[in-house]
């Protein structure tokens, strides 16, 4: 059986940006619903490297979570103010990554999430090969640092960021070529990338076998999993709609056995309700749906 966590960002950004659910309430409710842990969105108002600047601050937060019987499954690092593709100097990005990596170590967080930062329209300004080299070279450094720190590095591909074609995803992870670096497979992003070609520049790259075929192509390269449904639409014409289970098109009975073929080195599955307008109200329903998947495929 897998341990189940949920991403805390669902309650702080998008519809919740003006009235975020506070950390203490999130942890209490997550515990009440029978979750095993939380995937931390490392930005205000929830715990992050800047509002917990000292080791003592971090030990206190980590201890409070442990006292509830919960654990961290990963960190969504706040790297979005950085430049990765549209600059020759990615040293500031690496510095920010290292700040978040130190936070992971202090907090006992086993994985750090990254993305390509810039949208797919960046290729109108930066040619593909230059962009690829900047991302790969930078992530090689970051993956080596994370490996030394004992923290897994997981890249979340999606329609809203560059390198959002199936072949892009395979190419990037193969070129970074570090056992500590892998793909975060978010099921709604996987569906949109493989089945609709959402926001792909140039000719769309849609797989006949859909999201299951994409998972097959990435077998052995997946080191983190986010579970949520997809209704085949984009949220705000930017990123995949994270539709609660039962409200989408993903056949989890076909997808989960393939995802289960990855030896990720850990036992976490994470629910992701990012940008869902009433995430707090559907959290319990999503937990029940993933519990059922866990009984069948965990």
Image: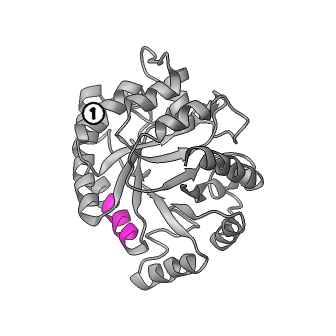
Q: Nearer the viewer, residue 225 or 139?
A: 225
Q: How many marks?
A: 1
Classify 10 Å Cα crowding around label 1: few (below 14), some (14-19), many (20 and above).
some
| Main secondary structure along the magenta-highlighted residues | helix
What residue is drawn where x is 40% and y is 58%? Answer: 111
Residue 278 colored in magenta in the image? no
Direction from residue 298 to residue 110 in the image, left or right: left
Q: Residue 97 falls in which quadrant of the image?
A: bottom left
Residue at figure coordinates x 49%, y 77% from the top left: 62
| Left or right of 116 on screen, residue 206 | right
Give the colouring mode of the picture.
Answer: one colour
Circle 1: element type: helix
x, y percent for residue 150:
30, 64
Q: Which corner quadrant holds the N terminus?
A: bottom right
Judged from this view, the residue extending furthest toward the right is 281
Q: Is residue 260 left or right of residue 29?
A: left
- Magenta residues? 96-105
- Coordinates of residue 288 in the picture (x, y in percent): 71, 51
Seen at 69% across and 45% down, the residue is: 276
- Residue at 43% x, 85% y is 56
Can residue 120 be spotted in the picture?
no
Is residue 140 visible to the viewer in this orientation of the structure?
yes
Q: Relative to 291, does residue 220 appear above or below in the rendering?
A: above
Q: For residue 98: magenta?
A: yes
* Residue 220, percent from left and from top: 34, 39
**x and y percentages locating residue 165 in the rendered image:** 41, 26
Query: Which residue was labeled with disc 1?
Result: 132
| Residue 136 in the figure: left or right of residue 232 | left
């Amino acid at each position: 059986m897998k341990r189940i966590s949920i991403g805390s960002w669902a309650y702080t950004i998008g519809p919740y940006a003006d009235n975020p659910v506070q950390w203490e309430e999130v942890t209490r409710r997550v515990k009440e619903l029978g979750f095993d842990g939380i995937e931390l969105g490392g930005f205000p108002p929830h715990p992050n490297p800047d509002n917990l600047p000292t080791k003592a601050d971090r030990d206190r937060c980590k201890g409070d979570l442990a006292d509830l019987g919960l654990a961290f499954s990963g960190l969504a690092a706040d790297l979005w103010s950085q430049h990765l593709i549209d600059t020759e100097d990615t040293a500031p990005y690496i510095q920010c990554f290292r700040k978040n990596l130190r936070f992971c170590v202090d907090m006992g967080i086993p994985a750090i999430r990254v993305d390509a930062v810039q949208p797919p329209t960046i290729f109108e300004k930066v040619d593909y090969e230059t962009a690829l080299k900047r991302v790969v070279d930078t992530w090689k450094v970051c993956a080596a640092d994370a490996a030394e720190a004992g923290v897994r590095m997981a890249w979340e591909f999606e329609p809203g960021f560059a390198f959002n074609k199936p072949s892009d995803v395979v190419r990037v992870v193969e070129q970074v070529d570090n056992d500590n670096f892998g793909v975060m497979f978010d099921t709604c992003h996987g569906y949109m990338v493989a089945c609709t070609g959402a926001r792909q520049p140039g000719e769309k790259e849609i797989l006949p076998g859909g999201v299951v075929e994409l998972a097959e192509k990435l077998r052995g390269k997946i080191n983190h999993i986010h579970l949520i449904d997809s209704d085949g639409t984009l949220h705000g014409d930017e990123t995949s709609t994270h539709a609660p289970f039962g409200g989408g098109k993903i056949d989890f009975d076909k997808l989960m056995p393939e995802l289960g073929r990855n030896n990720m080195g850990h036992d976490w599955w994470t629910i992701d309700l990012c940008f869902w307008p009433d995430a707090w109200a559907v959290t319990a329903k999503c937990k029940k749906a993933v519990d059922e998947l866990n009984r069948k495929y965990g």
